[in-house]
Image (cartoon, rainbow, N blue to C red):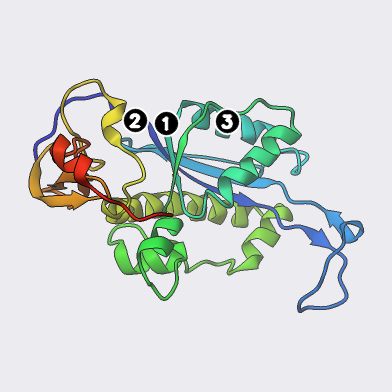
């Protein structure tokens, strides 16, 4: 695979864990919880992240905080990484991780981090495939070979979050491994799915007149043509990962374009 030394976007893989909302309820099924039933609202428990191209996995949590609900220090670490990122990748992060982080930022009076693009691997899976489940546990088990979401734990299911809130040091050690492995599994899963996601054009992140794939390859092969209602365009396929691209130049002649008829809306 041919590669060139070009400035690449700073891609950050993230995963958060939050404390549960504690509320007074009367039933176990289909309970409509009112605001006045909430005893304790959620807050961040831990945050893990990793830069693409780096082996370092970052992790911070609330295990040593006197007030476990005061997550400002943890948020400052998260804010600093997000502020540097060009692209943030997460699993369901566009609906959970990023909105949750933003909620805590604004509650603590923090400014928004610099704008970044988002890639959500769960949304890619939902949009492009028909897997039995789009959960990270299922997808990493089926598609990843090196890192999979941790499932065998001493504190199974909700017990891990419950024991962390109760300041169980063994639970916090397990949370650290759980959160960091989620990020590693996420990165490997993204590498499996990125050829199916054309949402970001990586060429705009460098100034050279060369086409660079999201996988880093510069090897392309012409692969037929793409068509719109008013144009014909050369198609290209990455020889390394198979991602498809389309040139911007309309290959139809001016005369042909003038002769076209399109349907009314």
Q: Residue at x 89, y 61 (%)?
A: 37
Residue under label 2, please give it. Answer: 9
- Hey, which quadrant is residue 27 in on the image? bottom right
Label 1 sits on a secondary structure element that is loop
First-in-chain label (3 vs 1): 3
First-in-chain label (2 vs 3): 2
Locate the N terminus and report the quarter of the image it occupies.
top left
Label 2 sits on a secondary structure element that is loop
Looking at the picture, tell me which residue is in the foreground, 80 or 263: 263
Percent from the top left, x then y, of residue 66?
76, 38
Residue under label 1, please give it. Answer: 86
Q: Nearer the viewer, mark 3 or mark 1?
A: 1
Residue, far right: 36
Q: Residue at x 76, y 79 (%)?
A: 29
The CA distance from mark 2 to mark 3 is 18 Å
- Hey, which quadrant is residue 73 in on the image? top right
Looking at the picture, tell me which residue is in the foreground, 220 or 67: 220
Residue under label 3, please give it. Answer: 79
Looking at the picture, tell me which residue is in the foreground, 66 or 208: 208
Q: Is residue 6 above or below residue 72?
A: above
Residue, far top: 207
Label 3 sits on a secondary structure element that is helix
Percent from the top left, x then y, of residue 33?
83, 65
Locate the C terminus and report the quarter of the image it occupies.
bottom left
Q: Residue at x 78, y 40 (%)?
A: 67
Percent from the top left, x then y, of residue 93?
52, 49
**Contact (CB < 8 A) between labels 2 and 3?**
no
**Contact (CB < 8 A) between labels 3 and 1?**
no
The CA distance from mark 2 to mark 1 is 6 Å
- Crowdedness of circle 3 by 10 Å Cα count: few (<14), some, many (20+)? some
Q: Nearer the viewer, mark 2 or mark 3?
A: 2
Percent from the top left, x then y, of residue 125?
39, 62
């Amino acid at each position: 695979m041919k590669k060139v030394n070009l400035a690449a976007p700073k891609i950050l893989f993230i995963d958060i864990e939050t404390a549960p909302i504690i509320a007074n309820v009367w039933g176990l099924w289909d309970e409509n919880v009112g605001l006045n039933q909430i005893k304790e609202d959620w807050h961040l428990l831990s945050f893990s992240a990793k830069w693409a191209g780096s082996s370092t996995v970052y992790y911070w949590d609330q295990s040593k905080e006197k007030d476990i609900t005061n997550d400002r220090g943890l948020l400052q670490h998260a804010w600093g990484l997000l502020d540097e990122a060009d692209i943030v990748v997460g699993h369901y992060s566009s609906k959970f991780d990023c909105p949750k982080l933003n909620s805590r930022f604004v509650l603590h009076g923090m400014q928004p981090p610099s704008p970044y693009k988002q890639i959500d691997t769960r949304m890619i899976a939902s949009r492009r495939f028909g897997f039995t489940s789009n959960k990270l546990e299922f997808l990493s088990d089926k598609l990843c070979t090196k890192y999979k979401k941790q499932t065998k734990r001493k504190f199974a299911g909700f017990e891990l979050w419950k024991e962390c809130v109760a300041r169980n040091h063994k639970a916090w050690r397990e949370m650290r491994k759980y959160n960091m492995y989620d990020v590693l599994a996420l990165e490997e899963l993204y590498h499996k799915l990125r050829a199916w996601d054309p949402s970001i054009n990586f060429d705009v992140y460098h100034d050279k007149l060369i086409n660079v794939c999201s996988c880093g390859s510069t090897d392309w092969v012409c692969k037929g043509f793409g068509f719109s209602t008013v144009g014909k365009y050369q198609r290209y396929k990455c020889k390394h990962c198979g991602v498809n691209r389309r040139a911007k130049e309309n290959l139809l002649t001016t005369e042909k374009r003038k002769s076209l008829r399109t349907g009314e809306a």
